Amino acid sequence: MTKTLRPARDFTPAVPVLGAYDPIVSLFTRERQWRSALLAQLAPRPSDVIADVGCGTGSFLALLGRSGSLPRLIGIDPDERILERARAKLAATGVRCELHRGYLRDAAALLWPLQPTKIVSSLVLHQVPLAEKRAGLAAIHAALVPGGELHIADYGLQRTRAMRTLFRLVQCVDGFADTQPNADGIVPRLMREAGFAEVEETAVIPTPTGSVSLYRGVRSRAPKDRA
């Protein structure tokens, strides 16, 4: 099932040569390591409704589908080319998933009828402007059921000179203005500003392009009116 919301908005597109997207991400981000840690942190259950916001080519959704936990899966991404690759990948692995075209800030409108219990996002926040980071996290908070969880894997605080130097490769590709707030460690603060409680950085994984951090937060407040 595919649903489209609103016309295109600016975003950092995936690698132009789409066939190279997955190998490049795997090589330069130690994808297997942080995806395994993210899956363990997410701890999917059969009763879960899990949305991957910024799902890309569907690699993490495929991993979730093969985990044996059998939650309901939803993927959101703004790039129709990438969604086509996700459809093919998920079909090839036999994973059932709903795919919707949308941006971070569209999460509430796309997801609230589905009542997601957990939302995951990986390597997305560092690619978008600060205003979109804030709007996206607020929309994700609004989309989750009370007690629902947000799990993030993304470039976070670059704590050492070596990691800051390596991260410049990402900044040259994705732009300094969008990526620098992540490198300065802003993600936990933005999560709290969006209303998340129990916010914590649970892991820091060094990669050839800087350190990737895992974060977790919980929606504990009463649900707001949803537009």
Image (cartoon, rainbow, N blue to C red):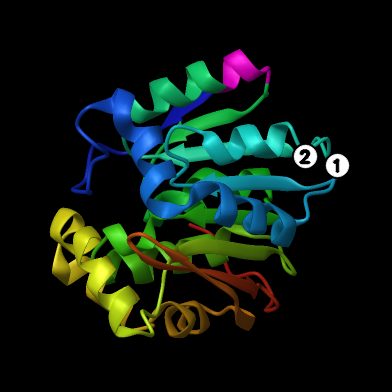
Residue 5 appears in the figure: no
Please report the residue visible at 15 percent of the width from the left and 70 percent of the height from the top.
177
Please report the residue visible at 47 percent of the width from the left and 26 percent of the height from the top.
86
Q: Is residue 153 above or below residue 211?
A: above
Query: How many C-alpha atoms fall within 10 Å of the one at disc 2: few (<14), some, or many (≥20)?
Result: some
> What is the x, y in percent for residue 199?
61, 81
Q: Is residue 112 above or below residue 56?
A: below
Three-letter amino acid code of the residue under disc 2: Pro
Please report the residue visible at 42 percent of the width from the left and 38 percent of the height from the top.
56
Q: Which residue is mark 1?
A: 46
> What is the x, y in percent for residue 95?
67, 23
Three-letter amino acid code of the residue under disc 1: Pro
Counting residues from the N terminus, which is met first, the one under dot 2 or under dot 1?
Answer: 1
Q: Which secondary structure, mark 2?
A: loop
Query: How many C-alpha atoms fall within 10 Å of the one at disc 1: few (<14), some, or many (≥20)?
Result: few
Q: Which mark is residue 71?
A: 2
Q: Are marks 2 and 1 in contact (CB under 8 Å)?
A: yes
Residue 209 is left or right of residue 91, and the answer is left
Q: Main secondary structure of the magenta part?
A: helix
For residue 169: magenta?
Answer: no
Residue 108 is left or right of residue 47, and the answer is left
